[in-house]
């Protein structure tokens, strides 16, 4: 089967590289700047979680917008939510009648957008668990060894297309599973990333930094209560053990944990505030749930994003 990975950043680059290393037919759809970087240096996974093959150079197959010549069997979509519309225009020629589209995006709004464009049966839900980032050289730094991907049909059915996708993505150096309740799993992840994202971006510190100051230990659980209330109202209550696991994580003394939102802010990149925080708060408001901490973090990150725009 042919696999098109849209985006070769910290997440898409990781999974695409592992699949290519395992002998799969992988092509990356990238922007010109990233293409130049990969052609010069290659694609490498480095860092403390990369394992024995850390630093192995991969010379990936690359295409850019306008160069796709036919459908792929699987499209792994790994871009920022803010780039979704442009990405759809770029990879649409690669989606045929039997193509499976597996998005790695945060939040839930992208499912409706992709389903409207390509059909619900073609678009699977996806939950990625991995801690990676790009360094200045463009290498993928894997900070922890755990890496997993869960996929599932939006209606919960185990179709032939879903099973074929699972088989093709299996055995490539990361854990993969099928969930018959992928929407619930996506909501659960959304609650987690919104909690730690709002907490660390609002306070501009790690979990350990925050819990070390008076009142800091109460912040994460308070945000978690808001986010989980929204999920429950939407019909997807987060299991008690997952709530407790997140609560422990956001109250752990000395923890170096942060979030993609806070890392984006620290590195001067636009933050995915609309998709991760604002949409969650908006859905809560639709159910009559007040989310003052999520609202505050949303406002703060909107101000930050606006500060990045050139003044007129």
Image (cartoon, rainbow, N blue to C red):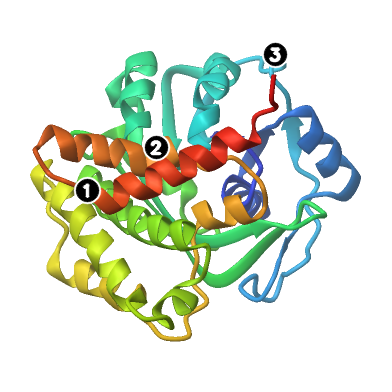
**Circle 1 SS class:** loop
Which residue corresponds to mark 1? 291
- Tell me the distance, in whole angstroms, between the alpha carbons under discs 1 and 3: 43 Å
- Relative to 84, say whether 150 is above or below: below
Q: Earlier in the sequence, mark 1 or mark 2?
A: 2
Residue at the right extreme, as displayed: 40
Which residue corresponds to the image point at 52% horizontal and 62% vertical from the top-left? 204
Image coordinates for residue 78, horizontal then vertical, percent = 53, 39
Which residue corresponds to mark 3? 66
Front position in the image: 239 or 265: 265
- Image depth: mark 3 or mark 2 in front: 2
Seen in the image, is 78 located left or right of residue 241? right
Seen in the image, is 76 located left or right of residue 7? left
Q: Which of the numbered marks, if any, corresponds to residue 196?
A: none
Front position in the image: 226 or 1: 226
Image coordinates for residue 15, horizontal then vertical, percent = 57, 51
Which residue corresponds to mark 2? 275
- Relative to 173, say whether 93 is above or below: above
**Circle 3 SS class:** loop
**Circle 2 SS class:** helix
Q: Residues within 10 Å of mark 2 (few under 14, many from 20)?
A: many
Q: Residues within 10 Å of mark 1 (few under 14, many from 20)?
A: many
């Amino acid at each position: 089967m042919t696999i098109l990975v849209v985006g070769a950043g910290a997440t898409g680059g990781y999974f695409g590289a592992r699949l290519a290393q395992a002998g799969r037919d992988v092509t990356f759809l990238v922007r010109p700047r990233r293409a130049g970087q990969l052609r010069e240096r290659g694609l490498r996974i480095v860092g403390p979680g990369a394992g024995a093959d850390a630093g192995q150079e991969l010379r990936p197959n690359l295409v850019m917008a306008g160069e796709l010549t036919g459908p792929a069997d699987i499209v792994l979509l790994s871009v920022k939510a803010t780039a979704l519309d442009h990405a759809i225009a770029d990879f649409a020629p690669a989606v045929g009648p039997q193509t499976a589209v597996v998005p790695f995006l945060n939040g839930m709004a992208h499912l409706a957008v992709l389903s409207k464009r390509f059909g619900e049966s073609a678009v699977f839900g996806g939950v990625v668990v991995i801690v990676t980032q790009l360094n200045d050289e463009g290498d993928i730094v894997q900070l922890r060894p755990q890496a997993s991907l869960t996929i599932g049909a939006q209606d919960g059915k185990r179709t032939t297309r879903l099973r074929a996708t699972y088989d093709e993505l299996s055995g490539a150096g990361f854990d993969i599973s099928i969930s018959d309740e992928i929407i619930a799993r996506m909501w659960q992840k959304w609650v987690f990333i919104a909690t730690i994202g709002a907490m660390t971006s609002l306070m501009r510190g790690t979990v350990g930094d925050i819990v070390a100051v008076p009142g800091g230990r109460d912040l994460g659980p308070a945000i978690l209560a808001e986010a989980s209330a929204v999920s429950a109202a939407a019909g997807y209550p987060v299991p008690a053990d997952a709530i407790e696991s997140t609560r422990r994580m956001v109250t752990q003394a000395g923890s170096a944990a942060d979030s993609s939102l806070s890392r984006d802010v620290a590195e001067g990149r636009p933050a995915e505030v609309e998709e991760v925080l604002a949409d969650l708060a908006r859905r809560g408001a639709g159910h009559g749930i007040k989310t003052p901490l999520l609202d505050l973090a949303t406002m703060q990150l909107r101000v930050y994003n606006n500060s990045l725009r050139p003044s007129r």
